Amino acid sequence: MDLAARITAIENVEAIKALKYRYWRACDGKDPEGFRDCFIAKGARIDYGRMGAFDDVAPMVDIFAKVALYTVDGKHVIFDMHHGMHPDITLTGEATATGRWTLRFRQVNLLMQTETLANIEYDDDYVIEDGEWKMSRSVSTETWSMTRPLDPAATVTEPD
């Protein structure tokens, strides 16, 4: 592989990493549009276990918006933290790739007064659509989780 091809490959892998990080940032930032923009326009295969399996991103965006944006007395009640790591990206063609990731997930649920910690493995497919890398398939598998009650003295604050 010549130098130009190697540089292009590195740039493509870095663009895919940036896409996945943008996706998790949208999740944590309660940004349904940003979440949506990480997937192909039509026909993305999504399987998020307990959250559901879909043949397009739209139903998953609806679920995400209902959960992430839910408020009580004008305050959010679900807070997520996605820490993705261990990217294993394989370019399979000029405009296709696969990827595996590990996610350390944390959620504070003020409705249930719980904190959940989980380890989740992602298996993704990527394609270039309209000049940008997008996810065309994303399957997550929870390998373990732990839910515990929040300490009654715990408080969650959000910026105004």
Image (cartoon, grey):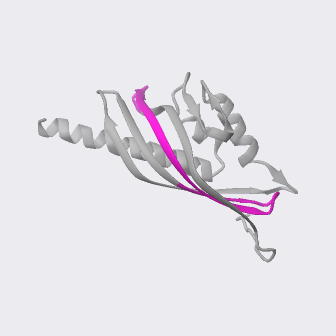
Displayed quadrant of residue 99: top left
Residue situated furthest right in the rendering? 73
Q: Quadrant of the C terminus?
A: bottom right
Q: Position of residue 102 (x, y in %)?
A: 47, 51
Residue 12 quadrant: top left
Q: Which residues are magenta?
A: 104-132
Residue furthest out toward the front? 144
The reply, left or right, for residue 85 in relation to residue 76 is left
Give coordinates of residue 60: x percent, y percent: 66, 34
Asked whether the viewer can see residue 121, the reply is: yes
Number of marks: 0
The secondary structure that most of the magenta stretch takes on is strand
> Is the residue 76 above or below the residue 18 in the image?
below
Q: Is residue 123 magenta?
A: yes
Q: Quadrant of the N terminus?
A: top left
**Residue 103 drawn at (x, y percent):** 51, 52
Which residue is found at the position 55% from the left and 27% from the top?
A: 45
Q: Which residue: 68% across, 30% down? A: 59
